[in-house]
Amino acid sequence: MRLRKKRNHKESGAILPSLCLSGDESYAVNRDQTLSWTLAQKDRSLRIYRALFLFSILANTTLGLWCLFDPGGFAQFLYLPPEIWPRFWGAALLALQAVFVPGLISPVFNRWPNLAGIAICFFMAFVFLISGASYFILAFWNLICGLVLLAAYYNLLMADLRRHP
């Protein structure tokens, strides 16, 4: 068994040490199998997910406050009927954002707030879709938030899984 350095052309010319059994160089360690690379991938995925989840929480908190303090203005802005629903929806939205904070702090450990937040986005998109054509803007917002958060959280969980096989 001999230690040999092999130039990996796929990884921008980085020279990585590889352990070669016999003369076959197909057993070379590539960059995807190193612990530092998987740790960096997990950290990158964590930063991206936290930024997206924080944006979602701040945007929904802003909408919740707007609905709570100016329900008529919110309904008028979206060309919706000025009923009492915006105030109740805003209060529920604010309460949900408070529940999601532990998921923002530690999304890998506190999975329930993150998965619940994604599921609630999809549920609310469905509710707004069946409520009528005037609620399509809110349905679209919740659907896009749910899809983006789902993709980012999936990448985070896969990066964490690769880090701890």
Image: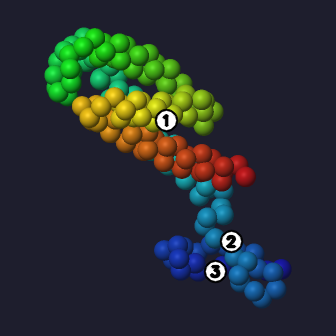
Query: Who comes first in sequence, dot 3 or dot 2?
Result: 3
Query: Where does residue 38 sit, x and y in percent of width and height?
Result: 61, 55
Q: Look at the picture and state if 111 lies above or below 6.
A: above
Q: Look at the picture and state if 128 lies above or below 149.
A: above
- The kind of secondary structure element at disc 2 is loop
Query: Where does residue 107 sit, x and y in percent of width and height?
Result: 56, 34
Q: Is residue 100 visible?
A: yes
Q: Quick one: 55 or 93, which is closer to the camera? A: 93
Asked if disc 3 and disc 2 are in contact, CB closer than 8 Å, the reply is: no
Q: Type of residue at label 1?
A: Ile
Asked if disc 1 and disc 2 are in contact, CB closer than 8 Å, the reply is: no
Furthest-bottom residue in this view:
23
Q: Nearer the viewer, mark 1 or mark 2?
A: 1
Q: Which mark is residue 6?
A: 3
Q: Is residue 151 left or right of residue 127?
A: right
Q: Which residue is mark 2?
A: 29
Q: Type of residue at label 3?
A: Lys
Q: Which mark is residue 118?
A: 1
Q: Nearer the viewer, mark 3 or mark 2?
A: 2
Q: Look at the picture and state if 5 lies above or below 116.
A: below
Bin the neighbour count of mark 3 within 10 Å (Cα to Cα): few under 14, some 14-19, many 20 and up: some
Q: Residue at x 34, y 17 (%)?
A: 90
Q: Quadrant of the N terminus?
A: bottom right
Query: Where does residue 2 sit, x and y in percent of width and height?
Result: 79, 80
- The kind of secondary structure element at disc 1 is helix
Q: What sort of colour scheme is used for the picture?
A: rainbow
- The kind of secondary structure element at disc 3 is strand
- Spatial CA span between label 3 and label 2: 9 Å
